[in-house]
Amino acid sequence: MKREIDLKEVSDGKLYTSNDMVKMGCDDCSGCSECCTGMGNSILLDPYDVYQLTKGLQCSFDELMNSDLSGENVTSGIIGIDIVDGLILPYLNMRGIQERCFFLNEEGRCRIHDIRPGFCRLFPLGRIYENGTFYYFHQIYECRKTHRTKVKINKWLGIPNLKKYEQFILDWHDFLEKVGEEVRRSSDEGMVKQTGLSLLYVFYRKPYDVQRDFYEQFYEKMAVLKSMI
């Protein structure tokens, strides 16, 4: 999701890599779940998130989109879809008047912490893309905790094979940028709709083999979609 921001207004003005230390440690949140409420449809899910969720919860993407896995009738599933920069992308649904994340327990703790989406792992960091790579920046006003401690970014993210993951993030971002630009330029409504549906199907709805490496499957899917559009 594109955002027009002034880094001087929202951050400490520095750009970081995953090996850098940032003052964002919050004593394991200490029960605070402020960042897990009122997020609307902003917690976008990338293919790695969906791979992790379907693997960890032992369900399909369609099941996540159409239910809350409780067996009860619901008006919306765990996942919703929206048009973002001209493309159809999934996001994590919020629930109730307070717009709480579905995966928060009664104590305000995450029930899927080990497989939580990348957006959640990143917070309160952001990414800025430039010159064929990206850097992290610290959104200093996003977390209400005070007296924060320094934490290494790679530890904060807690993602195995971080180098592969960061390359995936960069390739996914660049791919969405190129496809999104073509879609936004096009006056062919049929092509625009078909491109969006194809992206949703290939990267999200078409099941991943959870016994196989995610990254191999991702690049296979990318090759397929490129040939389609």
Image (tube, rainbow, N blue to C red):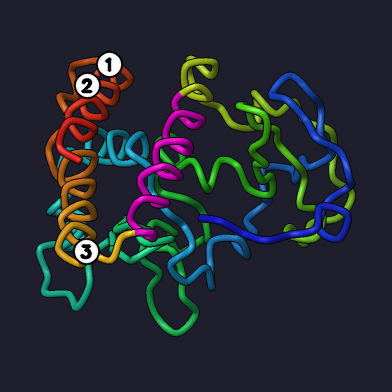
Horizontally, residue 103 falls left or right of residue 62, namely right
Q: Earlier in the sequence, mark 3 or mark 1?
A: 3
Q: Secondary structure at mark 2?
A: helix
- Residue at 33% over, 66% down: 82
Q: Nearer the viewer, residue 59 or 19?
A: 19
Asked whether residue 170 is drawn in magenta, I would say yes
Q: Gap in Å between the C-alphas at discs 3 and 2?
A: 27 Å
Magenta stretch in the rendered image: 168-185
- Residue at 40% over, 37% down: 175
Q: Pinpoint residue 224: horizontal percent, then vertical percent.
A: 17, 29
* Amino acid type, mark 3: Asp
Q: Gap in Å between the C-alphas at discs 1 and 2?
A: 6 Å
Residue at numbered disc 1:
216
Q: Pinpoint residue 154: horizontal percent, then vertical percent.
A: 65, 24
- Residue at 60% over, 61% down: 35
Q: Gap in Å between the C-alphas at discs 3 and 1?
A: 33 Å
Residue at numbered disc 3:
188
- Looking at the image, is 74 positioned above or below residue 120? below
Between marks 3 and 2 in the image, the one whose residue lies nearer the viewer: 3
